[in-house]
């Protein structure tokens, strides 16, 4: 079986309220990815989009993005999860032998719809949704409190993650402007408005407008397109229980199981020693610590002890992560693009030295209910 390679990518700059339309964004992302790879529209054989009808405000919303996304007269489908899940679908299509170039594009415009109201549809329709007490905002508070109480992690340690990621985002020209702050302090984070106690506003990955696109090709084709393909050598995915009350929110069982699956496929025995960086989809600062532990990079409750600065022991989210901008449906795909940049040495301004293997993850659901993780490697 041939390997599957990432041969091109493009991300539109993130905005809290973009001054141009969604379809222009989609076109810019897909056209940009093709141009970067030196390809044309006729080279596309399949297009996978990742949007959500609730977010787009219409049924079968991908039908209106066919032309802008490069899918006219090509095979086309949609995944209503995260862009990282859409990549898995595109990867399967490449591995089927039926396609030579897959376009995966993902993202939305959070400024154009009531994001938190739409996410209420993730809750139980009988008991939770009518009162709206359990929602994506309060769930983050439950999760952070559970993590702090179980392991004795302090709010200051969690605020440190927000400081790190917002400083990293200030070096990333594509990150959300409002998320960039090179002078932020832990005190600033703890003094910001309460989001859902104990979560503070500056700890949260802010929904925003943005689209990203990525190109996949089988091994032989990939090597013809670029001399710097990034190979997908492992992938794992898992989903935790639906009800928050049935889950241990201080941990992430779904990420633990997903990472074991990916590591086994990629032949990874010791991720801390064998992998160089990680781009993790963290909905809030405390999730980076929980997911870091679930990935086996530290023991449970020891997440704050691992130096994950750009020049630290194990860099995590050198791009700023989701805290640097969180376009619904597109954030996981951006994590994969950012990991690809690091491997190719193209993360200008926030490049980590000597990156050859990387982790990239996506998620959906409240409190990272469903996680998907990729192991990416450079070299021909």
Image (cartoon, grey):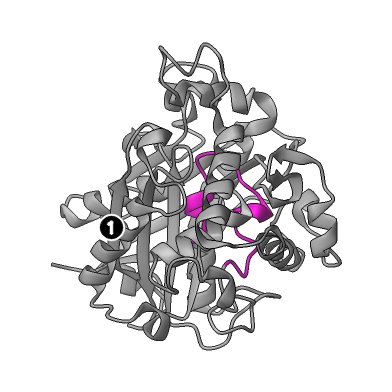
Q: Quadrant of residue 171?
A: bottom right
Is residue 327 on the magenta stretch?
yes
Name which residue lies at 41% across and 20% down.
Answer: 124
Name which residue lies at 32% across and 54% down.
Answer: 101
Q: Quadrant of the N terminus?
A: bottom left
Q: State which region is magenta.
A: 317-336
| Outermost residue to the left | 1
Residue matched to label 1: 257
Residue 292 seen in the figure: yes
Is residue 139 shown left or right of residue 88? right
> Does residue 313 sit above or below 333 in this rendering?
below
Residue 41 seen in the figure: no
Q: How many marks?
A: 1
Q: Quadrant of the C terminus?
A: bottom left
Coordinates of residue 264 in the picture (x, y in percent): 21, 70
Coordinates of residue 346 in the picture (x, y in percent): 58, 75
């Amino acid at each position: 079986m041939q390997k599957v390679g990432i041969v091109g990518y493009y991300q539109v700059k993130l905005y809290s309220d973009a001054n141009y339309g969604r379809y222009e964004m989609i076109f810019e992302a897909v056209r940009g990815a093709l141009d970067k790879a030196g390809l044309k529209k006729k080279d596309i054989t399949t297009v996978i989009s990742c949007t959500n009808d609730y977010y787009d405000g219409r049924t079968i919303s991908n039908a209106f993005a066919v032309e802008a996304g490069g899918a006219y007269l090509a095979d086309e489908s949609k995944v209503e999860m995260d862009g990282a899940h859409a990549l898995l679908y595109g990867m399967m299509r490449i591995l089927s032998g039926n396609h030579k170039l897959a376009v995966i594009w993902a993202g939305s415009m959070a400024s154009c719809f009531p994001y938190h109201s739409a996410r209420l549809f993730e809750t139980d329709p009988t008991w939770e949704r009518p009162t709206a007490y359990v929602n994506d905002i309060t769930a983050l508070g439950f999760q952070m409190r559970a993590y702090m109480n179980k392991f004795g992690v302090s709010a200051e340690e969690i605020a440190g993650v927000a400081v790190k990621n917002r400083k990293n985002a200030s070096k990333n020209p594509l990150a959300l402007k409002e998320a960039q702050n090179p002078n932020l302090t832990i005190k600033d984070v703890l003094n910001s408005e309460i989001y859902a106690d104990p979560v503070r506003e500056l700890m949260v990955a802010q929904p925003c407008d943005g689209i990203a696109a990525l190109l996949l090709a089988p091994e032989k084709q990939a090597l013809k397109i670029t001399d710097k393909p990034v190979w997908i050598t492992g992938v794992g995915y898992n989903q935790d229980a639906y009800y928050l009350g049935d889950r241990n929110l201080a941990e992430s069982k779904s990420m633990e199981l997903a990472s074991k699956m990916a590591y086994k496929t990629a032949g990874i025995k010791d991720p801390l020693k064998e992998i160089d960086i990680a781009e993790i989809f963290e909905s809030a600062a405390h999730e980076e610590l929980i997911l870091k532990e679930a990935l086996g990079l530290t023991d449970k409750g020891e997440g704050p002890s691992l130096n994950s600065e750009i020049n630290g022991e194990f860099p995590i989210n050198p791009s700023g992560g989701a805290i640097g901008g969180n376009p619904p449906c597109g954030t996981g795909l951006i994590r994969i693009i950012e990991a690809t940049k690091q491997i190719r040495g193209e993360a200008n301004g926030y490049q980590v030295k000597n990156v050859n293997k990387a982790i990239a993850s996506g998620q959906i659901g409240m409190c990272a209910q469903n996680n998907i993780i990729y192991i990416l490697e450079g070299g021909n």
